[in-house]
Image: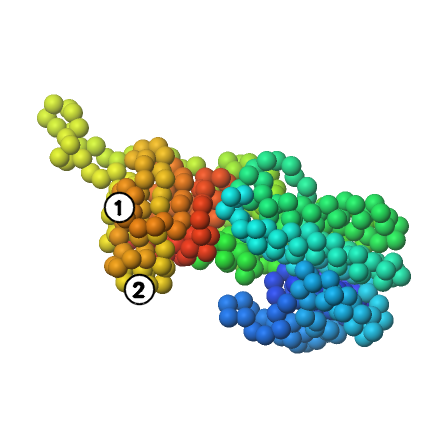
Amino acid sequence: MLPNTGKLAGCTLFITGASRGIGKAIALKAAKDGANIVIAAKTGEPHRTLPGTIYTAAEEIEAAGGKALPCIVNVREEQQIVDAVEKAVEKFGGIDILVNNASAISLTGTLETPTKKVDLMMSANARGTYLASKICLPHLRKSNIAHILNISPPLNLNPIWFKNHCAYTISKYGMSMCVLGMAEEFKGEVAVNALWPQTAIHTSAMDMLGGAGVEQQCRKTDILADAAYCILTKPKSFTGNFVIDENLLREEGIKNFDVYAVAPGHPLLPDFFLDVDPNTLAMKMEAHGASPVFREGKKIESAKHEGPDGAESAAAKPLGPVAETFKIIQGAISEDVVRSTQGVYLFELSGDEGGTWYIDLKNKAGSAGIGEPPVKVDVVMSMSSNDFVKMFSGKLKPTMAFMSGKLKIKGNMALAMKLEKMMTQFSSKL
């Protein structure tokens, strides 16, 4: 990993969303130099599912050698940012670095994204970044270090990154456009850059999006912490850049990236907004003996039984892959599954065995089969029959199917994610 140089000793970093994940990793890296860290995040009380609070993060930062100022900050609330900045200046004498890390995500289409979710993403991601930057800038301009770092992607206008989650992309690109504008506006005074990972990073958000086992296809937050440290220790003249973590660290002489992997040697998922040809990536992954979850599989052929005249015997014909999958799902449904899921799912499948199928994990003992369910549907999923079979057998991750456009989802996204968790139970029987 990238060694610490001590260049951030005594510097004050204001980091949004620093109670866990990427923000906390960047804070801990700087703390090893003896930096002052303002932990500007929402979590003051322990969350029922997410790890850490601003106070537990403060304890870790001080144990690592830094000084910490935990502040309750929702970046959607301007006054909370103002108050935290005033406390930071009073305690540490100024602000040298701002890291805009706090972010909200909802990977839903235009018609499936409630206005409340749109407002959350726009106000937390684009507006929150803009506000934090605006409020910190008067102090940053007085610093000899003077850096703003946004955890946001390069501005890739390939439509594939808009069509499945338009609102999320607009909100993240808003953060990146702050880099584009402010780097030029404050050139020579404050460096403004963006940092984005080459691969998926294992965080609580990734666990939610990717489901069980996704961490093996991720890198640890340490890689972004090292890349951020590298950027923040550069002079102000390094500005207006959209940096990819791996590319920068290679330039810095890092050669062994296995140290950053959750499961060294295991193939990695590419992150959003970076154009990677799926077939090229899949070939690299297969060289490691992996079966990429996003690769187009060969068409599943069912064995055919022929009669004496060479014609296929209808009586002996086995169930097709989709029908066989639903048969197994039906056998795997239990009262516990129904009780914990409480959702009705409709599948609109194309290709062989195309048509309408359903899984009812809400009513009575549950059921699954062909046709429309007799009750109200909560989630509609559209995909090919081939991809449906691969998804339920564990060969295609729902997250990758959704990201690549193979799976379209309408309705309750929370229930859609619940079904993904159930798939691990079904896939063991398929």
- Residue 280: x and y, percent? 53, 36
For residue 98, above or below residue 57: above
The kind of residue on which mark 1 rests is Gly
Of residues 3 and 8, the one drawn nearer to the viewer in this rendering: 8
Picture quarter containing residue 103? bottom right
Residue on which the image places disc 2 = 336
For residue 305, above or below residue 83: above
Which residue is located at x 85 percent, y 71 percent? 93
Of residues 60 and 412, the one drawn nearer to the viewer in this rendering: 412
- How packed mark 1 is, by other alpha carbons closer than 10 Å (few <14, some 14-19, many 20 or more), is some
Which residue is located at x 58 percent, y 40 percent? 162
SS of the residue under disc 2 = helix
Picture quarter containing residue 223? bottom right
- Residue 276: x and y, percent? 58, 39
Residue on which the image places disc 1 = 369
Which residue is located at x 57 percent, y 54 percent? 116
Q: For the N terminus, which image quadrant?
A: bottom right
User: Which numbered disc, 2 or 1, marks the residue that appears first in the sequence?
Assistant: 2
